[in-house]
Image (tube, rainbow, N blue to C red):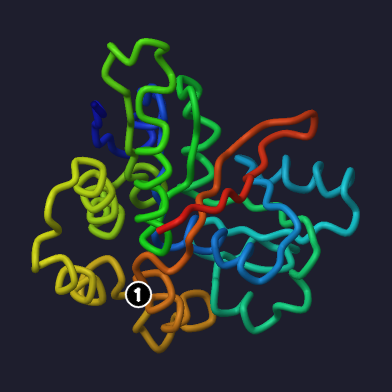
Amino acid sequence: MIDCSILHLLEGAQAAKGVTVIIDVFRAFSLECYLYDLGAKLVRPVGAVEEAWALREKIPDAVLIGERHGIRVDGFDFGNSPSQIRDASEKIRGKVCIHTTSAGTQGIVNATGASQLLTGSLVNAKAVARYIRSLDGKSDPDGSVPFPVSIVAMGRSGKERTQEDELCAEYIKALLDEKEIPPSFDQRRQDLRNSDGKRFFEPSLQEHFPQEDFHMCIKTDLFPFVLCVKKDELGFYCEKIPVIL
């Protein structure tokens, strides 16, 4: 049995227990999936910009990727745009990518109560659910204690709920509960362009929020792997684990 809760924003990350999924659809954890698909050697999420620079000192050929308020951090190689990184894939292949964002990576560093930490987005939602179901009962030898799962929808800067992260959280929970996905799901995905995805269609914002990012981030179940967040002497890193869909 899986005991699954949906939590919200930074305080949700801080309250999360058990296997914890940190969701950031627009765009952090969609981007990290695309980074691995483009051949990145390793993705290292960090909280602060200063930490990113310090880590680059230790890994000189690493690629710096990140944003604040959606805008590329000054001096970084890339912002948080999957389409712009896809178009420069030769600079990603085989490289360590250091990644910091306003919401997603903040959820990682604040989820200190998690027993296992995963990133989540629409592009690998089914893989996340399948992976978690494969763990069911393994944390308790006799399987008598409900399996705790916290799904955290990070929202905008970890402070304001957003429809895309809430939708993704609901979708993963429905998959975990083995419930039928409502027919409205696909329409709700498309309707994001009229709400929290509206900025991707503003002509004046295309430098920072390309329209193609929207389409890349709302794709569903594109990647058959999860990103499991672990820690070593240099800090956090995301391990890519294949999942059979």
Q: Which residue corresponds to the image point at 38% horizontal and 79% vertical from the top-left?
A: 215
Task: Judge the density around disc 1: few (<14), some (14-19), many (≥20) Cα neighbours within 10 Å.
Answer: some
Q: Is residue 158 left or right of residue 236?
A: left
Q: Quadrant of the N terminus?
A: top left
Where residue 192 appears, as percent x and y from the top left, is 24, 70
Vertical relation: 144 (above or below) 28: above
Relative to 27, residue 156 above or below: above
Kind of residue at badge 1: Arg
Residue that appears at 18% across and 72% down = 186
The residue singled out by tag 1 in the image is 199
Query: Which quadrant: the C terminus?
Result: bottom left
Q: Position of residue 225 (x, y in %)?
A: 51, 55
* Residue 17: percent from left, percent from top: 38, 22
Going 50% across and 22% down the picture, which residue do you hit?
A: 112
**Picture residue at 68% right of the left edge, 31% below the top:** 231
- Tell me if residue 69 can be seen: no
Most foreground residue, 93 or 143: 143
